Amino acid sequence: MPVVVAVVTTLATVGGVVASGGDPIAAIAPTLVVALVYVITRIPLRWSATTLVLLLIAIDIPSDAGGLWSSPFIFVGDLLHDGFSRLAHVPFSGFEAIVALLMILAAWRHATSSDIDGGESVRTASVMRDGILVFLAGCAYAVAMGFMKGHGLALWKIRYLLQVPMFFVFFQTAFRRPEDFRPLAVVVVLAAQIKALMAVWIQLVVAPALTGGRLEYATNHGDSVTFAMAVMILLIPLMVERTKRSVTRALLLLPLPLWGMLLNSRRLVWAMLAMAIGVIFLGTSWRPWKSRIVKTALILSPLIVAYLAVGWRNAEASGIFTPIAKIHTMLDSNVDRSTLWREREDWNIAESIKQNSFLGAGLSGQYVEYIFNDDITSLYADYKAWPHNTVLGMLLLAGVPGFAALWLPFLLTVFLAVRAERRARSGDDRILAMVSLAAIVAVLSMAWGDTGAHFIQYKVAMGLTMALVAKLAVATGAWPSTSASKA
């Protein structure tokens, strides 16, 4: 086998040099690929999965900036997404191919009783597996309804939906125990730092050269999920078990993502944070940190009221008042044209739901504009087929039966996270459960506010959170399991 690999690598190197006219990168590429494949086959699957998550949420892709700017690693982001499809002439992305190959590797290790991944594997809560089967049935139903109504097959929509359970299956295979997920907290925070630095560079260096000022945004809207999760990952340990280490970590690592959120100027991220904190406060067991927050809020109530009033009255407020001002513009269409556009979109979707039967328009359908709205085809051609509000959009496309099936994994994730938090036997398990709640809030906010599964951050976060709570629920006793299975 080593001889065969050496011969193939040599031939590929010679072919690359000839085809590229002596390009040194083409010469070393086959050797690098062989070395990478060898490393992947020798390390635990969770390491490969962790690296893939970092690449998917930290590296930009060409569509982020429309060719106006890019990072030095944009070619990697392109290959992970549509670039691979164009290059290989296949109807799937690079990350889908990688996940498929890693799942084949996992199956091979299981069949050969390999001990590379080591240790015991905590079972996945059976209710989540059942929920995924129901989700797949709902997807099939929505596709069938589209055919029955003559809309044809919208393969890109099917892929959007199926990538969530794909990530769930992959992550629950790669991460065998709840503690295996902990390095992902570092990955998310690191990705947020990278995207924040990119936002700083774009708004303070690139934008002045292009426009003489700042751009409307710096990175894609999916990064709101990354930013919100990173901030909550740093804040939640302060709630559960405030230590010198957690305080120092927050003080050092929070400023840059918060600055990146300000420069990225995405309103939804502030709503994500507010709702995540609210859900965690109301949905988890009563702990001393909640008493401290209530007492502090009462003492500071005059300042809090003044802060809210100043931010709310000035939609253009900046600095520390930005979160309140941004949330105000989301709720008041009189002060923001984008909010008015979304209200009209919601109205058109609601009217389209009324005009379709209880059974839905079919996944390949789209909503009808019963009232005039601004034409954004040049910015987003599929806005009627995959609306910004994908919650109402799925209710239209999948109907009540399909929507109930597609929504089930979200409900199960919240259910298992809340139960796991209450059954947690350690601070680490409680933190994992609370981070899961924050992640699901961010994901659902993106689904309601801006196209949801259109963004890779949404799909990765949803798949990870489902896999984590399904393992954590069994580990904490929040969901029954007969035994732990050996690797």
Image (cartoon, helix red, strand yellow):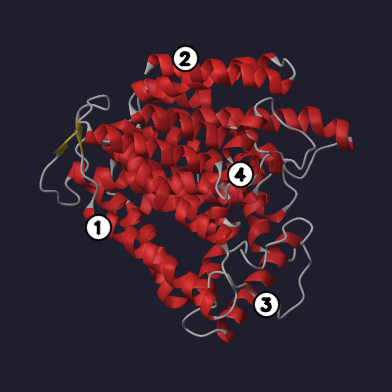
Q: Which residue is mark 2?
A: 6
Disc 3, SS: loop
Taking the view exactly as shown, the residue that stands out farthest to the left is: 482
Asked whether, in this view, residue 292 is left or right of residue 255, the answer is left
Disc 4, SS: helix
The disc label shown at residue 85, or none: 4
Of pointers 1 and 2, the one earlier in the residue sequence: 2
Label 3, label 4: how far apart the Cα atoms are: 31 Å
Label 1, label 4: how far apart the Cα atoms are: 35 Å
- Of 265 and 37, nearer the camera is 37
Disc 1, SS: helix
**Quadrant of the image occupied by residue 464:** top left
**Residue 82 horizontal/vertical position (percent):** 62, 44
Crowd band around label 3 with a 10 angstrom C-alpha radius: few (<14), some (14–19), many (20+): some
Q: Is the Cβ of the residue at disc 2 closer than 8 Å to that at disc 4?
A: no
Q: Nearer the viewer, mark 1 or mark 4?
A: 4
Query: Three-letter amino acid code at disc 4?
Result: Ser
The disc label shown at residue 368, or none: 3
Label 2, label 4: how far apart the Cα atoms are: 28 Å
Residue drawn at 47 percent across, 35 percent down: 53
Q: Is residue 252 above or below residue 214?
A: above
Label 3, label 1: how far apart the Cα atoms are: 37 Å
Query: Three-letter amino acid code at disc 1?
Result: Val
Q: Which residue is mark 1?
A: 127
Of pointers 3 and 4, the one earlier in the residue sequence: 4
Residue drawn at 64 percent across, 37 percent down: 78
Of pointers 2 and 4, the one earlier in the residue sequence: 2
Crowd band around label 4 with a 10 angstrom C-alpha radius: few (<14), some (14–19), many (20+): some
Query: Three-letter amino acid code at disc 3?
Result: Val
